[in-house]
Amino acid sequence: MRYIRVYMFIIIVLLFAACGGGSSTTVTPQQGDDEMQLMRVACVGDSITKGYGLEEPSVQSYPSQLASMLGDGWSVKNYGLTNSTLLQKGDDPYIHSSTFAESQTFAPQIVVILLGTNDSKPLNWQHKEDFVADYTALIRSYQALGSSPQIWIAYPPPAFPGIAGISDSTIREEIIPLINIVAQNTSVGVIDLYTPLSSREDLFPDTVHPNAEGARIIAETVYSAIY
């Protein structure tokens, strides 16, 4: 009888498990229970997003200033990667980076993508025929997340006129029109960061990266779009 009781106990345990008893919700490595209750925003981009050239990027970068504007109830993470490109054949493709993987693990509910500045360099822009397909692939990777994020893609800010091969004319005349095509094809929102900064050369000390005031304008523009 003792063996029968043990056997019956094992059967009950197995049936309980099969019906879902004792199951638990998986939380991604970057998230605690408190963060899961917040609206999660992933700011994806290059050195402009990262806050290159700022004295205190952790405070002055546009994602940091956006977090202050949004306030309680929001978790804004900076996934900017210096020198990164949208183009997969570029010299430093964002989609192949660990930063990209981290942004996915964050399970964002809103994604703001600001890429294209480094793509305007001649060594990268020679692959411009891939721009729409590569941008679409990046967007689809976020759309496939279980968090079903709302996605916004941004025009790069202007360059005055640019450094290290970065070309303002390429950004204005070629990249921005292609971004509009991508947005239409993927049904995502567009944030215009070019127009509000087009006459503010004074905010770009090295002609490409905004200072804290320029980053504030970017944050305000993004805030107006997503909030």
Image (tube, rainbow, N blue to C red):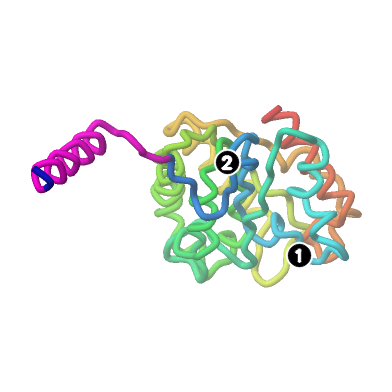
- Identify the secondary structure beneath mark 1: loop
What residue does disc 2 label? 111
> Percent position (x, y) of residue 76?
69, 45
Is the residue under label 2 in contact with that under label 1 (CB below 8 Å)? no
Determine if the magenta segment contains residue 149: no
Which residue is depicted at the point 14% across and 41% down? 5
In the displayed structure, 133 sits above or below 11; it is: below
> Percent position (x, y) of residue 196?
80, 38
> Percent position (x, y) of residue 93?
49, 64
In the displayed structure, 107 sits above or below 122; it is: above
Looking at the rendered image, the quarter that the C terminus falls into is top right
Instruction: Give the side of residue 32 with respect to residue 142, left or right.
Output: right
Q: What residue type is labelled 2?
A: Val
Which residue is depicted at the point 48% across and 36% down? 147
Judge the density around disc 1: few (<14), some (14-19), many (≥20) Cα neighbours within 10 Å: some
Q: Residue furthest front?
A: 1
Q: What residue type is labelled 1?
A: Tyr
What is the span of residues highlighted in magenta in the rendered image? 3-24
Question: Which one is nearer the viewer's eye here, 180 or 62?
Answer: 62
Determine if the magenta segment contains residue 18: yes
- Identify the secondary structure beneath mark 2: strand
Quadrant assignment, res 34 = top right
Residue 46, visible in the rendered structure: yes
What residue does disc 1 label? 52
Looking at the rendered image, the quarter that the N terminus falls into is top left
> Percent position (x, y) of residue 103?
54, 52
Residue 154, visible in the rendered structure: no
Instruction: Give the side of residue 67 with respect to residue 132, left or right.
Output: right
Question: Which one is nearer the viewer's eye here, 10 or 14?
Answer: 10
